Image: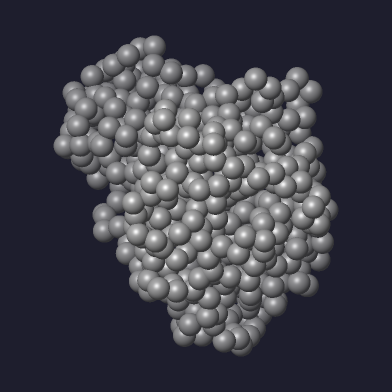
Amino acid sequence: MNDQSPAGVIKVLVAIKRVVDANVKVRLKADGSDVDIAGVKMGINPFDENAVEEALRLKERGHAKEVVAVALGAAAAQDILRHALAMGADRAILVETDVTLQPLGVAKLLKAVVEREQPDLIILGKQAIDSDAGQAGQMLAALLGIGQGIAASALEVHGQEIHVTREIDGGTEKLALRLPAVVTADLRLNEPRYVKLPNLMMAKKKPIQTINATELGVAAGPRLKQLKVADPPARKPGIKVSSVQELVERLRVEAKVL
Amino acid sequence: MSVLILAEHDGHKLKPATRQAVTAATSWQASIHILVVGHHIAAMAHEAAAIAGIAQVIQIDAPHLAHPLAEDVADLLVRHGRSYEVILAPHTAFSKNVLPRAAALLDVAMISDIIAIAGPNTYVRPIYAGNVNVTVESTDPIQVLTVRASRFAAAENGGAAKLVTLEAPAGTTLARWLDEKYTVSDRPELANARVVVSGGRSLASAEQFEAVLAPLAKKLNAALGATRAAVDSGYAPNDIQVGQTGTVVAPELYIAVGISGAVQHTAGMKDSKTIVAINLDPDAAIFQVADYGLVANLFEAVPELVNELE
């Protein structure tokens, strides 16, 4: 082991999701049934990368003893687990399923993983940038009957408690949560490290355990029926104004916003 | 049937988003109840009871609810929400914290950030940060929903709802509230501001970002926003980032200053009612979403705009 940090006591589980890259503008399938992600660049959900980073920092600060990354979905999600391993996670679990996963189903599957792994702290991203629901962490905490720190921008360990600073409208609030607890990461929590090539190579040697979701005995199927997807209504074409005076005049008279 | 609205408040007053949620709730043509949770909330309960169209206001007042925790509020929703077909709240930090927890305890799906109610169980919500709208149908017995408040008008006064007081059970031992810090600023909150002034990388430094944009924000009583590029360059703090990975805003007026118009950014602001773009590059993508585009040097145009607004 080349880990120089002091031995911690907390076991951290980080749940990550594979999503369309944030810089890709998604297209719709011709029949409007869903988005078309065939051949599109995919990667780890940005907020989940913050979650992995925070778990690693807990280990480096001597609080955490082990960081386990878990992903749910198709075998392709192995690539984001490799990414988490390359960042520094100790091991990874893929819960393989081809079921359409919605937040409640995600929470139910993760609950089953938590019951097997018995972590002290579970960290997720505050939302996934594809479905934008922002529910899985809260639902997981509910199903486990434990406390939640949602949209965290800072996290400190104090014995059997963690103090979570969370983003609220117009500021932050600080909560003390009894462990075990669920925390979801906001962007301000940290800046994820860059993965260096040697780490990527080393990550290939770290284990990824695959569990078939059916083994977990959980009804994780979708509750909501997706009827259609559509482009948002296009904005009506705008105009170029020739001067600041014209701009102010139009904002006053035409748009009536001043 | 009946709809339960979880009131959003600041401890003293109902937030306008509560009234906007009431308007969303009227689409069911059902009996609408409002739940007010907190401490010393009598005045707010009366305020809620005066909103037109409300049948009943339930107040739950206890010292440990002065800073309500998700664990406690979700528990109250589960205790008192089972007899409702719809549990609804505005899509705010408070509800985003509480409602998913309540939905999971009720073993029902939750639908977040609804922008249109297409039928009794059918909703439209943005995904991919507003680049796509999805229509979903729920068959759950209780619909747990948050609505994007800016899409609904605020309900007016004119009601005289029945007031009911319920006891709170003991508070949770899973979590304790420690403290809160509100950003000390004369500016309104970014997420709910009527006007937002945002800057991009063209501002070229943190000093210029503040020096150029702050006077305009002050003049318009606007919140300040920034692009991810400006945040990554260190010109603006992360908490004012507008975009797919930051805050999604939909103000009456959005002024984009020195912003190129990357998808990452426009996804977070293109629902704004009126968009103004000021950029030196006439081909900048931001002009495609702007109602009013001004091709100009921002360092000259913005101070001129401030003067013109005098």
- Specify whether B238 is left or right of B122: left
Please provide percent x and percent y for residue B31. 74, 67
Residue B309 position within the rendered picture, expressed as x and y whole percent measured from the top left: 25, 36
Kindly identify the residue that appears in the image at 39 percent across and 41 percent down. Answer: A192
Between B74 and A128, the one lying in front of the other is A128
Q: Nearer the viewer, residue B34 or A5?
A: A5
Residue A199, visible in the rendered structure: yes
Q: Position of residue A93 (x, y in %)?
A: 63, 47
The image's colour scheme reads one colour
- Which residue is depicted at the point 76% across and 33% down? A228
Look at the picture and state if A197 lies above or below A150: above
Above/below status of B155 relative to A225: below
Please report the residue visible at 34 percent of the width from the left and 30 percent of the height from the top: B229
The quarter of the displayed image where residue A218 is located: bottom right
Q: Residue at the front extreme?
A: A1
Residue B86 image position (x, y, % from top left): 73, 62
| Residue B161 appears in the picture as rendered | no
Give whichever of B50, B281 is nearer the camera. B281
